Image: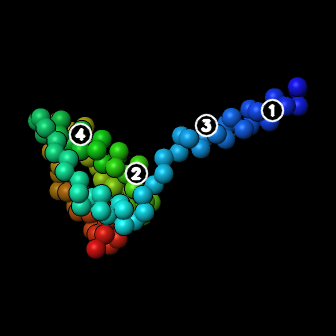
Amino acid sequence: MKKLLPAVVVLAGLLLAGCAATPKMSVPESCAFLNQDTFVPTGNQQQQAEQIAKHYQEVADKMAPEVAAPIQKMADVMEDVSGSSLGAKNDEQTKQLAEQMNKIGEYCK
């Protein structure tokens, strides 16, 4: 029985890890999802920035890595925006968001 226990623990760990992993979309599926995404934030500017950051994070977790990386960077920028006193993007943040959108556009033509 002692020899069986480590094997059971390893097998259980593998099964749990396999179940915990969320399958990622392909690039075409990711692009199709983005084209159909109708998320609209509500509330004041700061609340909207928080909601957008969270939405971008959730979307990035599902996407193909090529598309997820720029979306994750956009989520990080919006997280910074939401932490500002007014929740408004500055010129540099607007530029960073545009750069990431362009990267997504390279894959989603």
User: Of callouts 3 and 4, which one flags the residue occurring earlier in the amino acid sequence?
Assistant: 3
In 3D space, how far apart are the residues under numbered discs 1 and 4 (Cα atoms)? 44 Å
Q: Is residue 96 above or below residue 81?
A: below
The quarter of the displayed image where residue 33 is located: bottom left
Q: Which numbered disc, 1 or 4, marks the residue closer to the eye?
A: 1
| Residue bearing the label numbered 1 | 6
Horizontal relation, residue 58 to residue 40: left or right: right
Q: Give the SS element for disc 2.
A: loop
x, y percent for residue 26: 43, 63
Q: Amino acid at mark 3?
A: Leu
Visible in this render: residue 103?
no
Give the mark nearer the N terminus: 2 vs 3: 3
**Label 2 close to label 3 by CB (< 8 Å):** no
SS at mark 1?
A: helix
Name the amino acid, label 2.
Lys
Quickly name the residue at label 2: 62
- Mark 3 vs mark 4, CA separation in Å: 30 Å
Residue for point 39% across, 56% down: 63
Q: Which residue is mark 3?
A: 16
On the rendered structure, is 15 left or right of 62?
right
Q: Which residue is mark 4?
A: 51
Residue type (three-letter) at the residue carrying disc 4: Gln
In the displayed structure, 23 sits above or below 50; it is below
The image quarter containing residue 15 is top right
